[in-house]
Every structure is written in structure tokens, then in C-alpha cells.
Image (cartoon, helix red, strand yellow):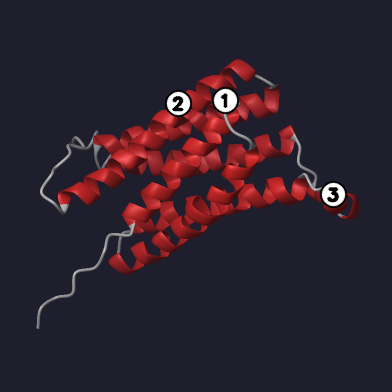
Amino acid sequence: MAEVQLGNPAVVGLGGFGMTTLILQFHNLGWVGLGPVLWIGLCFGGTAQLVAGLLEFKTGNNFGFGAFTAYGAFWISLCLFVIFGTNPEIVKAYPVLKFNAHELGMYLVVWTLFTIIFFIAALKHNTALAILFGTLVIGFIGLDLKELYGMEAVGTFAAWDLIVCAFTAWYLMAKIILDEVGINLPVGGPWL
């Protein structure tokens, strides 16, 4: 009996991560409002990426399982943080949910620390993945400084850095898609 070939869930995971990261940076640069960020974040970057992570579990890929599931949850939680934390009626009833720069900054700090672990592991995979997680760490640090200390210029730098991160995710997604049709994009060797 022929083995059934399964799709690679990383296509959806990388696609969702890249698109949501990109639209958020468009928002951070003032090019688009918050609506598209929340919808893409909840649906593609959040839910679809979370599902991709759960499908990676079945393949035995702990890196993909951990990354896609975690960052899918990141996008869902960030969107809900903004939606509920900026709603006047909800905040009036539950003041603890109020959205502010310090709370967002601390939220981002824990994700920065979490991302460093994935960056270290990415160094053993390939150059493109190391660039993706390296730019993600740099971007998170920039956003931490923007939210906690009001460093707007650093926040702008972080937005541009995270645009590079988003396109790197799409490059890795394209690699998987194009490999199937015989077009092989280079990803470089491991750094460690």
C-alpha cells in the first residue's frame, strides 16, 4: 500500500505568522488602522497558526509544534488584550483588563524571553530560520523599549525589522511550496 503524503503544516504556520506580523507593522508605521490587524491576528496568525502547530505535533517536529502553537496563541491573546482592554464598558466592569503601554510592554517582555529560546534552537536549523528568529528577538526588544519607555524611534526601527522578519517567514513558506514543483530556494546552513 502506498504511503499517504501529508501536507506540511509549516506552510500555514509561516504564512499566518508572516501576514499578521506584516499587517501589525503596517499599523505600527501608521499605514493601516487596528481593524485588519485584529481580524488577521485572530483568524490567520492566531487560529490557523495554532492549528498548524497542533498538526506539527503529529509530524514529531517539536520546534514547529512549539513555535506555531505558541505564536498562534500570542496573536489570539494580543488581539483579545486589545479588544477587551480598550472597550470602555468592559474596562469599567473589569478595570484589571485595561490596556496600557506598561502592561503591553511587560506582555512583550515575556514573549521576548520566550523567543530567545527559539532563536538559539533556530541557529541549529538553517540561516533563514535563524534570521527569522533573530529579527523577531530584535523586534520584540524594540517594541519592549517603545512600550515601556516611550522610545518611539526604537519602535519605528522595530517595525522595519519586523517587516524583514515577516518576509523571511514568507520566504520559508515559499521554499516549502516551491520545493514541491522543483524550484529550490536556498535557506543556508546552520550557524551552530
Task: Tell me the tag on residue 91.
Answer: 3
Q: Residue at x 32, y 53 (%)?
A: 11
Relative image position of residue 148 (x, y in whole percent): 69, 28
Q: Taking 182 as reference, is 6 left or right?
A: right
Q: Is 62 on the left or on the right of 104, as rendered?
A: left
Q: What residue sits right under mark 2 in the picture?
A: 161
Q: Earlier in the sequence, mark 1 or mark 3?
A: 1
Dot 2: what SS?
helix
**How far apart are the alpha carbons under marks 2 and 3?**
33 Å
**Residue at mark 1:** 29
SS label for mark 1 = loop
In contact (CB < 8 Å): disc 1 and disc 3: no
**Residue 38 relative to residue 66: left or right:** right
- Is 119 or 172 nearer to us in this picture? 172
Closer-to-camera residue (97/89): 89
**C-alpha span from label 1 to label 2:** 12 Å
Q: Residue furthest top?
A: 153
Q: The C terminus appears in which quarter of the rendering?
A: top left
Q: Would you call the spot at circle 3 few (<14 residues within 10 Å), some (14-19), or many (20 or more)?
A: some
Dividing the picture into quadrants, the one containing residue 58 is bottom left
Q: Nearer the viewer, mark 1 or mark 2?
A: 1
Q: Is residue 72 visible?
A: no
- Is residue 85 depicted above or below 31 in this figure? below
Say whether disc 2 or disc 3 marks the residue closer to the N-terminus.
Answer: 3
Please state which amino acid type lies under the numbered disc 2.
Answer: Asp
